Every structure is written in structure tokens, then in C-alpha cells.
Amino acid sequence: MEFQVIWFILWAVLWAVYFMLDGFDFGAGMLYRFIAKDETQKRVMLNTIGPVWDGNEVWLITAGGATFAAFPTTYAYMFSYLYSALLLVLFSLIIRGISLEFRGKSESPSWTGRWDTGIFLGSLLPALLFGVAFGNIFQGLPIDAAGYHGSLLYLLNPYGLLTGVLFVLLFLVHGSLWITLKTADTISENAAGIAKKLWIALLVVAVAFLVYTYFATHLYQNYLENPVLLIVPVLAVLSLLATGVFSARGAYLKAFFASCLTIVLVTFTGVIGLYPNLIPSSLDPNYSLTAFNSSSSIYTLKIMTVVALIFVPIVIAYQIWIYRIFRHKTTELDVAAGKGAY
Amino acid sequence: MDTLALSRLQFAVTSLFHFIFVPLTLGLSILVAYMETRYVRTGDETYLKMAKFWGKLFLINFALGIVTGITMEFQFGMNWAEYSKYVGDIFGAPLAIEATVAFFLESTFIGLWVFGWNRVSKGVHSLSIWLVAIATNLSALWILLANGWMQHPVGYVLRNNRAEMTDFAAMVTNPYGWLKFFHTVLSGYVIAAFFVMGISAYHLLKKTNPDFFKRSFRIASAFGLASSILVFAVGDFHAKEVAKIQPTKFAAMESVWNTKAAADYYLLVVPDTANERNSVEAVGIPRLLSFLAFGEGQAQVQGLKDFPKEGRPPVMPTFLSFRAMVALGTLFVLLSLIAFIISRREGLDSHSKFLKIMLYALPLPYIAGQLGWIVAEVGRQPWIVYGVLKTSDAASKAVSPLQVWASLLGFTLLYGFLAIVDIYLLTRTARKGPDEDISAILKHARVQEV
């Protein structure tokens, strides 16, 4: 296999894992204040993501770093073309991180209330904007010989926004299932109720997205040429259905894993449709940025492949270990005993 | 201002702001890890309280280091697209490796450290903070190897309209990068030492928790003495590397206009950049400049006039920053030495004058660190990659001045707000002193032992 193809796949994997992991942080960050009856319950929910959100976010840093190292031309254009959108993502992520860390530093309601808003916006905006960004990449950006012809407002087109809403709903369902699993009693029950309701909305939006994709993008081209690839979107739909079915039956662990799988497969569905493009041009395919015309030299790709093969498995191993250490449910007792840090 | 000037200003603001938080993380993680290890080894609860208290301050600072670091990674693509495209083949690698090898480790195990007091054994818990300490320093290594490549590009060839990597080992073993790494992390250790000594001095003056803060002060003074001497020594090697590889930067650092063999070093220099000379050169030490630059009193030091005007860095900021940094560095050795000696005798708390000095000296190593980066980056101008790519050719073409104005304004407001909150939290926590309830942790430790 060519190294460009390996890195195209790795690129997709990094984004997929990032969305799968930080996705439930975003979901929990959007939802906790609406599920909670009081401050203690809020803290219980925040403490479920406390030990892991930081490590989850690094998958984004690595996805960005991998884009830089493996596809520098794409990195350069993607980040400068989407300047204003990425700036908003950046500010939101900064605000989320700071709000999570600083919220618990004082008990006054005006203090915690402000950081609650920070966590909410810092979770909602990146979820929405990542969706908008990927929606626009799926459609292609207006690039030609003269450069880029879009703007922030241009990105907020109907298909981009629909993809944004899809991402928000995927993460909301994901996050509510996470809370269901990681808490007990009323919090868990309330979160489960919300997961079931939101899942219906997600299903509707997902169907709309699949249909609209046919009209707004060329993503299905690759599937028509290689029908065997259809297995990915089909599995994506099946895992989405499984998420709902398992939730309805009260099998929340299975539902959460089905939701993980849904997010990964939805990302793959999009990226397979893009191949070999990383950023297609909507004006002229000659100006599309592909895995081949925007990649690093083979020498660099080889070095980076060795690094990835050694270290990514190590990272996955210790992250799984950390998830196991914190596999218990967080309860109000934990928070009261001063064990919860947030 | 155009996109280029605004992007440069934004990079200066965001990177200097980022570097307020990073260096403390580099050193304080090691101190906290040491304190916790002492607790695990001796069972002495004061060490546990120390790890908790200094750890709390560490975390407030750490959070800002992390979030402002994301900006740095995004910014290369957002504002410096031409740069990223031209050198990404070689420059992207250390950044991606940093994330994979170091940043994951740091961010994953900080979670275990903060939330895991009652979840894992004492040993595993102290291991988690050691892993954080190792990872932050490892992270600095990869970032500084990347910066080292911008200062002294090696292991590449210009091909396909860009710089392509041909020798990964050359980049990883670049002496310039390694010197920069040691100089930078050691300066971070000095910051951490003065941070701990300054806050301890505050409490010793107020006579709150004297035993706790005497011990903290003592540990920090040893750490500070070792690192302030080493940062000086490495700095000397580093300056020799600069003289060899970046003669324009060295000439600007010392404000040398005319090429001279057996050059003297003047303690007092006032550059006159308009007339390309120094208006004052006083208190000379014969041949010292040649010796500092090349380790040899007879050596020839190149002057700025040897280079075309457009190839020289701005002299004034480079020169002043360098002088001030060296003066501060000398002061740190002196203060740590006194601190080290006094803290090993009885009656540290009776030296109230010295303790006051140590309290007010707390921000000085931060200033020295900022000045060091001004020397490194301003002194490299007009190049973004020394001798390979000009800064003026590196900015994004697709970005309008208006966009950068907006982002610069946004960063200034957001970072200003973060700075206020951070300083508020740090001073409040530092003033409060150790008030952590450690009974739950001790109980957990006892259960583990049974």
C-alpha cells in the first residue's frame, strides 16, 4: 500500500477516534446543567468526564499534527481558508478547558454559574463547528487558481449547517448515554430518558443528512464505483439503530458502544467518499487537495509511519488502562467526600 | 498594518503568553513529584500536604499552559500557511511526534493524578506525576527541536518548491536544538524554584505554617541553585553555538558593528543604531567577547556592518533583551546561593529582609524567560528559517488583515481575561496556604497496606 494511502486512513482514524472520545465530553458538557437538580448533581456529572477529557482532546491535537506532518499543503490551506471558523473552535476549546478546571475553585453560585455557561458554549460550539467544517469539506470548498473564495458566512450554508446539527445530536446522544452509564439513580435515569428522546431527533437528522448528501456532494461516487464499500455506511446506519434499540431495552453499555461505533463509522463514511481528496474543490477538481498532491515526501511519511506504529498502540493501551481505573460510577457520595476534583 | 505585521504581532502575543505558563509546569511538576515520592518513601504526612498544596498551584497554571498551547499548533496553519507549506515536510514531524509521544502521556496521566488519589496505590499515584513531569519535559524537547531547526536548519534539501526532510537523525540530534532544550527547561526550573521560594517566603514572613514552608523553601533552594548555575553554563555553550551558526544574531546580541579580532567585552554599551555604532562603550574587559563567542581570546568576531542592512535583525530589542537576561541570570545564581546557605541553617524565618527580596524576586525569572525568547526570535530576523525562508514570505495569502485584526483583538481580550482569573486564583490559593483535607487519602493508603 502506498504511504499516502496509509496516512489518509490514519488521518481518518485520528478524527474518528477524536470525535468518539471528545464527543461524549461535548455531549455531557452541553447536557449536565439541564439534567441536574442541584449543584451536587452537576458536580457528579462533571466528575465523570474529569479524569479523561484532557486526554481525549489530545486526539484533536494529534489529528492536527498528523495533518501538518503528512499533508502539509492541506494543513496550510485548510487552516488558513477556514480561519474564522477555526478561530471560533479554538476560543471555544480554550473556554471549555478553563471553565472545567476553574469551575470548582470557588463555591459561590455566581462563580460556578459563569463557568457553567463557559462549559456549555465550549462544548456546543466546537461540536457544531466541526460539523459545519466537515460538511463543507464534504461539499468541497470554492478553490481555484486564484485561491479560496469563501468566508465564514459562506460556510454556514444549509448542508454545512445540517452536518453541524448532525454532529451536535450525535454527541448529545453519546454524552447522555455516557452520563447514564457513569452515574446512578435519578441522574442516570434522567440522562437515559434524554438519550432516548434525542435519539429520535438524531435518526431524523441522520436520514435527512444521507439524502441531502446525495444532492449536495459527490461522496457517493466512490461507493457507486466500489459497491463493496457500502458496508461502511450500512453498518453506520445499523449501529445508529442499535443505539436506539439497546437504549430502549435499558442495555446502556451496549447502547454506548453502539454510539461509539456510529460516530466512527459516520466519520469513515464521509472520508471514504472524499478519497483521495482531503479537501475537494467545488469549482474545479484540478485544484482539489488530495492525499497525493498535498502529501509530505515518502521519506517523511515513512518516518512518521514508524513513529505512529510504535506509539499509537502504547497511547491506546494506557488510555484504556485509565478508563479501567475510572470504570466505577460517580455518585453524590464521591463528590461529598471530596474525592471529586471538579 | 498588513496581514504579515499583524500575524507577527499575534504570534508574539500568543507565544509569549503561552510561555508564561509552560516553564513553571516544567519545573514544578518535578518538585511536586519529588515531594510525593518523599511521602511515599518516608510516610511523612507533611510531604503529602506539600504535594497537594504545590500541586494545586501547579494545576491552576497547567490548565492555562494546555489551552494556550492549542493556539500555537493551529496558528502555523492559520497565519503562516506559506511557511507551513514550505517547511511542513520537516517541521510538521516534530510537532506530530510531540503530540503522540509526549502530550498524550501528559494529558492522560494528569487525569489520574488529579482524580486518582483514592483509586490507585500510593506508588502508582506518585508514578503518575513523574510521568507528567517526564512528558512535559519531553514535550519541550520536541518543540525545541522544531524551533532548533528554524534556527539552524539541518537534514533537508530544497526540492519540489519546498524543504524536504532527508535526514531525520540530523534533525533529532541538531546540537542547536538540544542546547536550546537544556537552556529552556533549566530556565523553567529556575522559575519553579523562585515560585516556591517566593510563596514560601510570603508565609514565613507571616509566620503561617513555618515548618511546612521552611521545608518547601529548602527543597526549592537546592533545585534553584543547581538549575540557575546550569542554565548559565548551558547559556554560554548556547551563545557559542549562536556565534558560530547565526553571526548576525550574535552581533546584534552584543551590539558589535565592526568585525574585530581579540574583541573586548564592554560592561556598559549604548548602541546608536542610526549611525551604526555604539555611542558609549565603557568598562572593557580585554578579549572577553572573543572568548565568550569562540572560547579563544584571539578569535575574530563578525560585526553587523559585514552584513547588508536588510539581512540584520533589529539590534536594540535583541541587545537589550540579551543584556537584561544575562544580568538577571547572574542575580538568580546569587540569590539561590544565599537562599541555599541560609535555609540549611537555623532561623530562616528571622531573615525577613532576604525573605522579602525572595518574595519580590518571584516574577524576575519569568521576565528572563520572556527576554530569552525575544533574543531567540527577534534575533533570527529577517529569517523565519535561518538562511532558508524570510519571515516576509511566510504569512498566509488567503487571510485578510481584517481577519487577523479580529483574531488579534479576540486573543488579547480572551488572554487578558484568562490572565486576570489565573492571577486571582493563584494568589488566593497561595495566600490560603495548605488547608487540604488529606484524611481520605491517608485512609485509602492504610486500606491499601492491609
Image: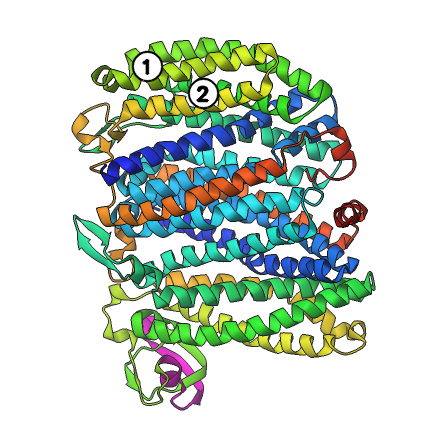
Circle 1 packing at 10 Å, graded few (<14), some (14-19), many (20+), is many
Q: Is residue A325 above or below residue B281?
A: above
- Residue at horizontal 30%, vertical 50%? A303
Q: Position of residue A137 (x, y in %)?
A: 32, 26
Question: Which of the 4 image quarters holds residue B208?
Answer: bottom right
Q: Which residue is mark 2?
A: A262
- Residue at horizontal 71%, vertical 52%? B52
> Can residue B406 be seen here?
yes
Question: What secondary structure is marked by label 1?
Answer: helix
Left or right of B162, for residue A160: right
Q: Is residue B62 above or below residue B331?
A: above
Left or right of B79, for residue A186: right
Left or right of B87, for residue B142: right
Question: What secondary structure is marked by label 2?
Answer: helix
Q: Earlier in the sequence, mark 2 or mark 1?
A: 1
Q: Position of residue A306 (x, y in %)?
A: 33, 48
Amino acid beneath label 1: Thr
Q: Position of residue A328 (x, y in %)?
A: 66, 32
> Can residue B317 be seen here?
no
- Residue at horizontal 53%, vertical 37%? A320
Q: Are marks 2 and 1 on the same chain?
A: yes
- Residue at horizontal 78%, vertical 62%? B212
* Chain of the residue under label 1: A
Asked if residue B278 lies in the magenta stretch, the reply is: yes
Left or right of B2, for residue B219: right
Q: Position of residue A216 (x, y in %)?
A: 29, 14
Q: How many marks?
A: 2
Q: In the depicted view, which residue is nearer to us: A234 or A286?
A: A234
Amino acid beneath label 2: Thr
Q: Is residue A215 above or below residue A300?
A: above
Q: Which residue is mark 1?
A: A213
Stretch of the chain drawn in magenta: B273-293
